[in-house]
């Protein structure tokens, strides 16, 4: 949530910052701004409500020449989106500028205190207090002043601060919000994530909570808040700048849907050995895993739907209780957790505040915590005893696609690996599973081919008043995820329901304007699902079914069918969701929506 970028070095800072903001825009896009210390030593600030394109237009594509600056793209928390509330914020002297991601929870007290002390605050934001606190603390050394100001803040922050009178220096700080240092040749960067700077350098330092980074061109020092130097390793980003570009597709979402076969291959790389599944990341915690007697999965949104597959398999294969809980609720009624509980925290970004808080609570109570995430160095990995990465490459569209299918695949492998360790998965079952996993990338490719007619089908449904998605067993998470995709990007109401629940209420919503989308792939619950589909048909609802190739019955029953190849039931969620992603995409395009950056959303949700 909110994107931050900072630069100091020999390049022109303005274009570097604008380029970084465009790449970070998926994090928030209700306003954007940059600040530069110009060659003539002036502080230049431009900020606008709206997307980065509005800011770029305001700048006339010609920001003043400068070798240092910072930029921000915002997802509003305190203060509505407006030019005034956009970041950067400045102090009373107009020398200090700040950009911030997070929430300063005690900003009202700080604001009152600052106003009583003679400061003038111009915006409604929590962030502006930081600029004024740094102003009060400044005695000629920006890093010292930032460290002093941090001592006053409660809440979460990733901050970058710049002072007009120290025109080569940027100071960054993080607490519960992501911030990385980019280490270039004679130049330095700060950014919310690597996407903003990978075109310039792949060498990065993931800051830890409490770190303060002091940057000049090509040099950096990291200290704790007391000023003691701390050592942090330099990591190398494993993907290229092109990986975060649209590559000829109309939208990132469409590109990422088409990347799913490769993403699945990447997720399984190094994890399928002969006829078994082996996640080396679990080796350091094998002993602890051997003693678990229950599994709790925690996640939000799409990741939660993926986790339902994981929970079902842990329970089926290990024969111990396993369930999944929405992370934001987990804390209010935490289940009994002790050292025999395995907690799996699933988060694409690894930054979701609710999931991090739930993982922390589980860790504090002694659970063994495993993170399943796409983001190396993310906060969730620090709350966990082991991390299993999706290896899916960067996902830029706000609506998750390739991270959903790789989450499901990774959770299947995780459950299989632990079941293998427990000696609860027979060699034959594991062999069958591994063979099916190996077939999956090609089958995902075929699913995309089979979905050729989906654009036309979507056009016929784009005027619906709403949708009802149903599925049973492993089709249920696919139905939930399909409904979420439609909601997010087309702004049409959609319900994802367990098919058996349809008759307990929501069936009253069905009519000629509210179609039924049924995940009806081959499975043990197929016949029951067909009965539910018929219930919808009998209420005049058009029926769009996702079905397994070769199913001759469904063609007679459904209005339209999307075909997927046959696979094992636990993997069917992965294939079934692909036509639903494409369906949502084309409905949204037909309705003229902003597919990659839907209103009110942000890619990573770093507030609770
Ligand atoms: C949906 C979507 C969200 C996220 C949710 C959790 O397309 O992207 O529902 O899945 O905000 O995010 P992560 O996985 O980053 O914890």
Image: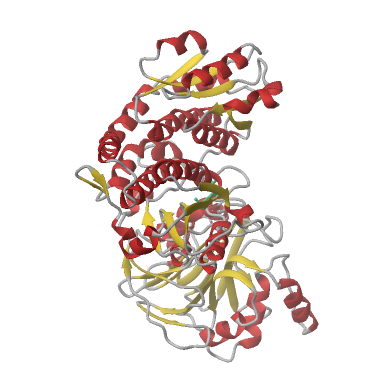
- Image spot of residue 105 (x, y percent): 68, 69
Look at 34% across and 74% down and name the residue there. 233
| Residue sitting nearer the eye, 217 or 286 | 286
Q: Decide: is 592 above or below 9.
A: above
Q: Residue at x 52, y 43 (%)?
A: 302
* Residue sticking out furthest to the top: 556
Q: Position of residue 118 (x, y in %)?
A: 77, 83
* Side (left or right) of 310 relative to 267: right
Give the residue at x 63% y 22%. 464
- Identify the image quadrant of the C terminus: bottom right
Query: Is 475 on the left or on the right of 33, as rendered?
Result: left
Asked which quadrant contains residue 153, the reply is bottom right
- Taking depth in this image into account, of 438 and 374 the one nearest to the observer is 438
**Position above or below: 189 against 578:** below
Please identify the quadrant where the N terminus is shown. Answer: bottom right
Residue 340: x %, y % from top left: 47, 61
Regarding residue 492, the answer to whether it shows in the image is yes
Q: Residue at (49%, 70%) from the top-left corner?
A: 69
Marker count (numbered):
0
Residue 593 visible from this viewpoint: no
Which picture quadrant has residue 206? bottom left
Quick check: 336 left or right of 272? right
- In the rendered image, the residue lying farthest to the left is 274
């Amino acid at each position: 949530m909110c994107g931050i970028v900072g630069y100091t070095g020999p390049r022109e800072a303005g274009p570097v910052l604008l380029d970084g903001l465009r790449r970070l825009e998926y994090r928030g896009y209700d306003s954007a701004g940059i600040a530069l210390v110009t060659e003539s030593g002036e502080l230049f600030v431009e900020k606008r409500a709206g997307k980065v394109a509005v800011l770029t237009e305001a700048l006339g594509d010609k920001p003043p020449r400068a070798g240092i600056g910072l930029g921000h793209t915002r997802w509003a928390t305190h203060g509505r989106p407006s030019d005034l509330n956009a970041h950067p914020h400045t102090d009373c002297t107009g020398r200090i500028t700040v950009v911030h991601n997070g929430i300063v929870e005690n900003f009202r007290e700080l604001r009152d205190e600052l106003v009583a002390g003679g400061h003038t605050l111009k915006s409604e934001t929590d962030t502006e207090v930081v600029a004024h606190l740094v102003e009060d603390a400044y005695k000629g050394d920006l890093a010292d002043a930032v460290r002093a100001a941090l001592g006053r803040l409660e809440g979460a922050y990733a901050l970058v601060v710049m002072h007009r009178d120290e025109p080569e220096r940027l100071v960054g700080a993080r607490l519960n919000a992501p911030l990385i240092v980019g280490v270039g040749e004679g130049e330095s960067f700060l950014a919310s994530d690597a996407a903003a700077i990978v075109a310039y350098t792949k060498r990065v330092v993931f800051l830890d909570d409490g770190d303060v980074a002091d940057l000049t061109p090509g040099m950096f020092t990291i200290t704790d808040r007391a000023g003691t130097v701390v050592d942090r390793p330099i990591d190398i980003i494993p993907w290229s700048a092109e990986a975060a570009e649209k590559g000829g597709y109309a939208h990132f979402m469409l590109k990422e849907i088409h990347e799913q076969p490769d993403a699945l291959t990447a997720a399984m790389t190094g994890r399928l050995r002969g006829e078994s599944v082996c996640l080396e990341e679990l080796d350091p915690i094998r002993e602890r895993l051997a003693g678990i007697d229950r599994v709790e999965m925690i996640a939000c949104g799409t990741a939660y739907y993926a986790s339902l597959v994981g929970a079902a398999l842990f329970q089926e294969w290990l024969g111990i209780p396993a369930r999944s809980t929405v992370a934001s609720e987990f804390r209010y009624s935490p289940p009994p957790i002790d050292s025999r509980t395995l907690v799996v925290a699933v988060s694409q970004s690894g930054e979701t505040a609710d999931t991090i808080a739930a993982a922390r609570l589980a860790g504090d109570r002694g659970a063994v915590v495993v993170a399943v995430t796409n983001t190396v160095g993310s906060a969730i990995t620090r709350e966990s005893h082991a991390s299993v990465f999706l290896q899916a490459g960067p996902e830029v569209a706000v609506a998750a696609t390739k991270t959903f299918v790789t989450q499901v695949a990774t959770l299947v492998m995780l459950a299989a690996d632990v079941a293998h360790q427990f000696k609860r998965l027979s060699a034959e079952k594991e062999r069958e599973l591994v063979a099916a996993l190996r077939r999956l990338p090609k089958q995902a490719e075929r699913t995309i081919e089979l979905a050729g007619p989906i654009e036309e089908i979507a056009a016929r449904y784009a005027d619906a008043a709403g949708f009802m998605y149903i599925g049973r067993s492993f089709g249920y998470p696919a139905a939930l995820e399909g409904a979420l995709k439609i909601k997010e990007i087309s702004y049409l109401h959609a319900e994802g329901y367990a098919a058996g629940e349809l008759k307990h209420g929501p069936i009253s919503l069905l009519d000629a304007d509210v179609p039924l989308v049924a995940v009806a792939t081959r499975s043990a619950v197929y016949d029951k699902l067909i009965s539910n589909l018929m219930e919808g048909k009998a209420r005049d609802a058009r029926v769009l079914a996702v079905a397994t190739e070769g199913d001759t019955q469904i063609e007679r029953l459904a209005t339209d069918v999307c075909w997927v190849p046959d696979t094992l039931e636990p993997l069917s969620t992965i294939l079934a969701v692909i036509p639903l992603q494409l369906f949502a995409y084309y409905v949204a395009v037909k309705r003229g929506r902003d597919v990659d950056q839907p209103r009110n959303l942000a890619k990573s949700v770093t507030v609770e």
